[in-house]
Image: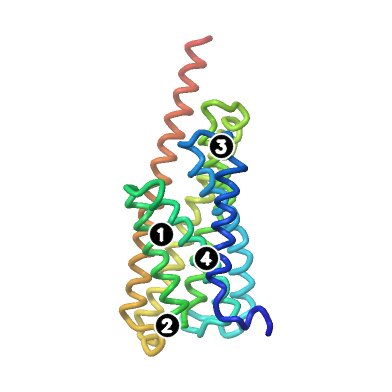
């Protein structure tokens, strides 16, 4: 049987992420403090998911000649959905174990899982829309995870501080463009299409309304987050300028 015809790889992908997480926690970051090791290990599985997911989702979309907001999921699109579902399940487990009070990220992951799982296991349509959103969300994954790891060690490792300072402006700019402009435009196109009612026979109204609501909320929170980072960056740069003036 061809690998892509096997319907469910969710368990296999979850085990892969689980093993990767354990290796990162107990081997790769064994010298890091207990406070930093969980977050760093989460970054590693995010790296394993993000960029590959962008590549896989792009191929899954481009290889489907009938792609549209209401087109049936292809076998490969379902495989990519399972790849992402497994990641979010593993990262949700990470938050439940180490950060059980972080309701923002726990809620984000649960809502994201709802969108992916209804697309994959309930309506079997709409993967084009969901995978496009996945691409727009994960295209910044590489920058974000390197930035996060550098941020975690910038106070005690000079190289990490340099990477953080160098990477912050381009990462913020790319993230702002994806979450502030490209993402909202695509969600608008989704909304207009589904509102027309042409997809109601394959994607019930309650499903697509839920999808739109989750995505709009996620984008709004992302815009707030990146806005705060821009403010922090500006404040840090101004402090450095003032410090140089005083030392002259």
Residue 2 at x, y = what percent? 68, 82
Task: Assess whether mark 4 and mark 1 are in contact (beta carbons under 8 angstroms).
Answer: no
Residue depth check, mark 3 versus mark 1: number of the one nearer the observer: 1
Residue 60 at x, y = what percent? 61, 74
User: Which numbered marker is on residue 65?
Assistant: none
Lower position in the chain sequence, tag 4 or tag 2: 4
Lower position in the chain sequence, tag 3 or tag 1: 1
Q: CA distance from mark 4 to mark 3?
A: 25 Å
Residue 226 at x, y = what percent? 43, 46
Lower position in the chain sequence, tag 1 or tag 2: 1
SS state under label 2: helix
Q: Nearer the viewer, residue 233 or 85?
A: 85
Question: Mark 1 highlights which residue?
Answer: 109
* Residue 204 in view (yes/no): yes
- Residue at 39% in and 69% down: 114
- Residue at 36% in and 63% down: 216
Lower position in the chain sequence, tag 1 or tag 4: 4
Question: Mark 4 highlights which residue?
Answer: 84
Lower position in the chain sequence, tag 3 or tag 2: 2
User: Which numbered marker is on residue 150?
Assistant: 3
> Within 10 Å of the Cα at label 3, are there few (<14), some (14-19), or many (20+) other Cα atoms?
many
SS state under label 1: helix
- Which quarter of the picture shows residue 66? bottom right
Farthest residue in the right direction? Answer: 2
Q: CA distance from mark 3 to mark 2?
A: 41 Å
Residue depth check, mark 4 versus mark 3: number of the one nearer the observer: 4
SS state under label 3: helix
Question: Mark 2 highlights which residue?
Answer: 123
Q: Nearer the viewer, residue 198 or 59?
A: 59
């Amino acid at each position: 049987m061809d690998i892509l015809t096997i319907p469910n790889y969710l368990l296999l992908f979850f085990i892969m992420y689980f093993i990767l997480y354990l290796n990162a926690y107990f081997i790769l970051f064994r010298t890091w403090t207990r406070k930093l090791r969980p977050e760093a290990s989460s970054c590693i599985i995010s790296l394993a998911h993000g960029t590959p997911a962008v590549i896989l989702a792009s191929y899954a979309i481009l290889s489907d000649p009938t792609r549209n907001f209401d087109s049936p999921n292809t076998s490969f699109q379902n495989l990519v959905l399972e790849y992402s579902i497994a990641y979010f399940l593993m990262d949700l487990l990470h938050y439940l174990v180490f950060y059980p009070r972080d309701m923002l990220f726990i809620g984000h992951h649960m809502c994201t899982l709802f969108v992916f799982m209804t697309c994959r296991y309930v309506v079997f349509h709409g993967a084009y829309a969901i995978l496009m959103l996945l691409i727009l969300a994960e295209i910044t994954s590489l920058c974000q995870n390197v930035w996060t790891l550098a941020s975690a060690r910038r106070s005690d490792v000079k190289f990490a501080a340099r990477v953080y300072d160098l990477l912050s402006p381009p990462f913020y700019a790319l993230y702002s463009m994806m979450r502030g402009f490209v993402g909202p435009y695509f969600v608008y196109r989704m909304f207009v299409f589904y509102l027309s009612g042409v997809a109601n026979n394959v994607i019930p109204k309650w499903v697509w309304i839920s999808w739109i609501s989750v995505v709009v909320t996620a984008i709004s929170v992302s815009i707030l987050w990146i806005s705060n980072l821009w403010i922090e960056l500006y404040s840090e740069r101004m402090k450095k300028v003032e410090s140089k003036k005083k030392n002259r």
